[in-house]
Amino acid sequence: MKTTETRTKNWWKQAIAVFAFLVLTPGVYAQVTVGSNKEPESFSVLELISNNKTGLRMPHLTTAERNKMTTAFIGSPEEGLAKGLTIYNTSIDCMEFWNGKKWISTCDGECIPDPADVDENASVSSCLPYMFTYQTMNLTASYAGDTPDSYLWIVDGKCILDNNSPAYAYTPPTNIVLEEDDLGNWKKTVKITCQMGKDGNIVQAADYEILVIKATKGILSPIYVWALKEGDPDAGEKSDIVAFAHVNLGDENVTNPCDLAGDLYQWGRERDGNGTTTGHFRRNLTDLDVLPNGIAQDPTESFIAETADLDATTGQVLLTSVQYGKFIKSSSSDWRSTPKYDLWGDGELNYSLQTYNPTWKILTNNPCPTGWKIPSVKQWGAIFRGGIIDGTSSSSTSGSTWTWFGTDPVKGYKVADALYLPAAGYRLGYRGSLNYRGTSGYYWSSTAYDSDYSYGPFFNKFGVIIGYFSLRVTGQSVRCIKE
């Protein structure tokens, strides 16, 4: 049955009457137009035509009132039957409708979070408040001593509508707006929080801030930091800007920030093997494949590379040697039987990079890709206090602040609010075992110390030792620097 009601005055009274008639009269099915003589469309059960002075006013509820109403039907068959239920939320001044699982705001086509006070018992956390634009950060929302009824994730003030879970995986959108800092880095601090439903009330965690840095997956990208001019601690100037690679060598394709650690090289060795299933630098070595020929033997027994195992020109392990592509366990100080000082650099204590001097064959030995090299010890010092000067993290005079941050086992230093140096630990030379990940960082420089040791910065939460030197048989991190 179609009926047409023509009303120009007090049409809202007829609307109420029609609603009552339809609801209270059993067996009556009608299509109705109120406010005009226009017949309703075939798909309309009710059409309201305004007199250009009035409109339809939806029920007004606060967020608390809405939640109380929602609690009454959640978990019952009515939860699904309530789809399409519509209100005007006076707490956020927006129309909302129930989609069968949650309330959806119609403001600007996006979900606008409810205003809620920060509850100190509510928290959002991740392994590290730092990531790159191609990575995904896993976050967790929690409430001390209790389990919330619902979760609403909010990123930079916008709701994430499809995730009612204590876990959230954040990937920066391709159109994320980054800002350039004074050094030339492109970055943004993203604020992420979570509103949790508890007993019909909403509690909110404080904003968790993640620094997002622009970088490209699969290649080394430059991160710029302040350095003392010419690395001189007496210059008193931080006028140099140097570019370090955004990750440790080996982490170019890591998409989970919690996994940033990198490979562990023995000093002076090239990137040997095929880089995936073989290679002495691999972090995931087993006790079998770290030994020559893959045969389990006494880990304290020396398998040092003798002259016959080495290329006389490059100083590297020969492809035909059983040590090629293996981490050489040795009770000696070096993986070579005879020390060589210029495998990665010029063998001198200076600020220069490895120059492409043809007598060194650096193009062969340098594990960094084209355009990148291993920094000298004084280039490391230039971003701290200059020269080979140690100190607490707060004593940096380069203009690049050193901040210890992260959670176990993902910890390290953030330098100049842009460069992350993970405490990636090291591999013990005579056993091949991993040690101190999340506690200490051991990095190589291109500079040899003497016949047994080479320089490289060491750090932990207590400070930085630029003049640290390690046995060359040790496996340590490599962070390349731009030529």
Image (cartoon, grey):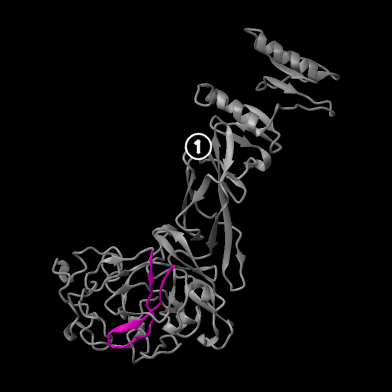
The magenta-colored residue range is 439-461
- Residue at horizontal 55 percent and vertical 46 percent from the top: 120
- The reply to whether residue 376 is in sight is no
| Above/below status of 129 relative to 147 | below
The residue to which callout 1 is attached is 148
Residue 452 in the figure: left or right of residue 87: left
Q: Is residue 460 a member of the stretch shown in magenta?
A: yes
Percent position (x, y) of residue 285? 26, 64
| Above/below status of 94 relative to 154 | above
Q: Which of 143 and 49 is in front in this view?
A: 143
Q: Is residue 466 a member of the stretch shown in magenta?
A: no
Percent position (x, y) of residue 359? 34, 92
Percent position (x, y) of residue 358? 36, 91
Percent position (x, y) of residue 314? 28, 86
Q: What residue type is labelled 1?
A: Pro
**Quadrant that contains the N terminus:** top right
For the image shown, how many numbered marks are present on the structure? Answer: 1
